[in-house]
Amino acid sequence: MMSAAAAYLLLSWKSSNGLPLFSDIVSHQLILYLSAALLSMIPFVVFCLIKFIPGRFLHGYEAVYKVEKEKGKTGKDVGLLDGLKLLLKYPYVMGIFGMVFFYEVVTTVLSYLRLAMAQSTSVSISGVSGELFKIIFMTHFVGFFISLFGTANLLRWLGERRCLLLIPCISGLLLVIFILSNHNHYALIAAYVVLKSVNYGFSWPVRESLYIPTIKEIKFKSKSWIDAFGSKFAKTSGGMFNYCTEGLASGLFLSLHAGFFVVIVAFWFLTAYLLGKRFEVAVERDEVIGID
């Protein structure tokens, strides 16, 4: 929130004569310098985590802990491609991939429309960037309150399975409102902001908790495939849809988006249902996913 607000204020800063205080190039250079300074602090934070957090606080799901302890004695080496093999082998892991894929496809389509909207309402590069940073600020502002008051309470009240189902339901409702508004400017911003903030504040931690009953190879190697390959594959798919619908008449454009979103949300809901059911069974039986 603070970084987005600072970038927005920098880009919209005016001098006493009403002109921008910095040129487009200088403004963006200052933002990149600030970003580089913040990123350089990450190794220090990681060092503090390694140095001061005792290992006993990293002991989580008991069944997985016992399996990993036993596997550690055998010294079995695992290759990078084993993460992909586990992704393809276990439907549970493929389900986690699906949760990432469907979200990224939807946000890629909405992000394309958001960029087009920002360009149509601005007269300069700084104006476009400022509009985008304002949307990012609103996203994290809403996400802050969701994570502060909603995530833990909803997980405690509803459980993992119902929370997983809540994600495609909320996303589908937002998309319906957006489609019925006939691609209205404010409806697009609202749909994008709420969808992104729900992902950051609620969907992400719920999705990450799905890794609890899995072995370390899935937690790290399969997860890296899902977060990198899965995300890029989804964005490519969403980008292809944007490319195919570019330049179409308004009525056909609207119909294609409506049909596309219906199919995505339907598969998203089915994946969430099966994934949540499998998670609850695994935890109830102290089962470890990823071992034969």
Image: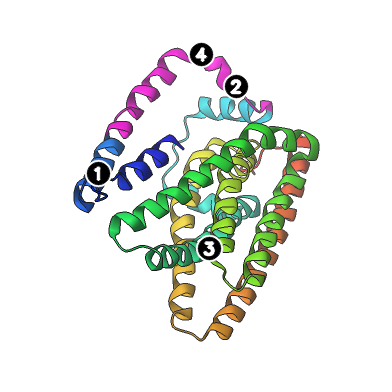
Q: In whole angstroms, how far apart are the C-alphas of marks 1 and 3?
A: 41 Å
Range of residues picked out in magenta: 37-62
Q: For residue 54, which numbered disc appears in the image?
A: 4
**4 or 2: tag closer to the N-terminus:** 4
> Disc 1 vs disc 3: Cβ atoms closer than 8 Å?
no
Residue 291 shows in the view: no
Quadrant containing the C terminus is top right
Amino acid type for the residue under numbered disc 3? Val
Q: Position of residue 10 (x, y in %)?
A: 31, 42
**Which numbered mark, 3 or 4, is in the foreground of this view?**
3
Q: In whole angstroms, how far apart are the C-alphas of marks 4 and 1?
A: 52 Å
Amino acid type for the residue under numbered disc 1? Ser
Name the residue rendered at 29%, 60% in the picture: 124
Secondary structure state at the residue bearing disc 1? loop
Q: For residue 105, which numbered disc appears in the image?
A: 3
Along the viewing direction, whichever of 218 and 106 lies nearer the viewer: 106
**4 or 1: tag closer to the N-terminus:** 1
Q: Name the residue under label 2.
A: 59
